[in-house]
Amino acid sequence: MPRTLAIIFLGFPLALPLTGVGKAEDTKKPVIGLVMKSLANEFFKDMQEGAVKHVEERGDLTLIPVGMHSETDIDTQINAVENFITKKVDAIVVAPADSRALVPPLARAIKAGIVVINIDVELDEAAKKQAGISLAFVGPDNRAGAKMSGDVLAKALGPGGKVVILEGNPGADNARQRKLGFDDSVKEGQLDLLDSRTAHWETEEANTVFSNMLTAHPDIQGVMAANDSMALGVVKAIDAAGKSGQIKVVGFDNIPAVQPLLKEGKLLATIDQFGSQMAANGIDYAMKALKGEKLEGWIKTPIKLVTAPGS
């Protein structure tokens, strides 16, 4: 009989056949809870698959991954952390949907003796200080990545190019950092920023938000989307408006769904932050911390600019 790993997906436990992963009842192996954002987002699907594969290869721990219903379903993440505290897991690796809201439950986890590793989205420094905790951050330079992507758009449009920004969740630090990076590109490239609104990382919301932007500003020439899921919604809206090829788009994440858009020139650039490796790195750091290694500061993970051919 194949060994299994319990997967909690959208609050429902599933059994997934795995090889090289310890049984959940094997108390000699540490149990690590992985708290991700929406598994409807390909980036986090990729993250989960990478984490599960990594655990199979390691074979020295049990992993329990948890996802959210949507990018704004912060309560599910909070409940997942509380559940892991009750289960007395050894460590929690978390990509918080909100940089402040997740601090109190994670502080409770730390006080319960659970190792916490913060990946992808940095927790708020002031909130951590108020809660009396200190955590290393394992993740990319979101501001630098957004500027790299935004600079491609700035170069394509030239000074005076009319652009808009679609932001991520207002409460998430990576959304704030990517907005700052795009702002850097706007300023340096002397672009004309017409509007900046959140679409909460979601494809359909981005489609609606950008359609409204286009109605208000029919002269839009370029779009900076803070993730590729939103970029998909933007491209769909551009096509529906009959403006395909007239409005240039850049994104962030390099998810599989945007690869055809890059080839077709509908997406000029995106940023690969190697999501499949990020959770795996977090798991490795959790195991190191469980062995007594002290983790501090910002442990930077790689980013890479991916551009459309000829851009």
Image (tube, grey):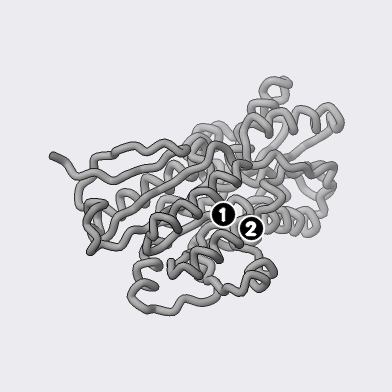
Residue 21 visible in the current orientation: no
Query: Does the residue at mark 1 contact the one at mark 2 (Cβ under 8 Å)?
Result: yes
Left or right: 189 in relation to 304: right
**Image quadrant assignment for residue 210:** top right
**Image quadrant assignment for residue 131:** bottom right
Residue 291 pos. (x, y %): 33, 75
Q: What residue is shown with label 2?
A: 99
Residue 22 pos. (x, y %): 22, 54
Residue 237 pos. (x, y %): 69, 26
x 54%, y 44%: residue: 76
Question: Is 50 situated above or below 289?
Answer: above
* Distance from Cα at disc 1 to Cα at disc 2: 6 Å
Left or right: 79 in relation to 284: right
Residue 224 visible in the current orientation: yes
Question: Is 105 situated above or below 285?
Answer: above
Q: Which mark is residue 96?
A: 1
Residue type at mark 1 is: Pro
Residue at the extreme left of the image, as rendered: 1
Residue type at mark 2 is: Ser
Residue at disc 1, secondary structure: loop
229 vs 15, nearest the viewer:
15
104 vs 240, nearest the viewer:
104
Residue at disc 2, secondary structure: loop
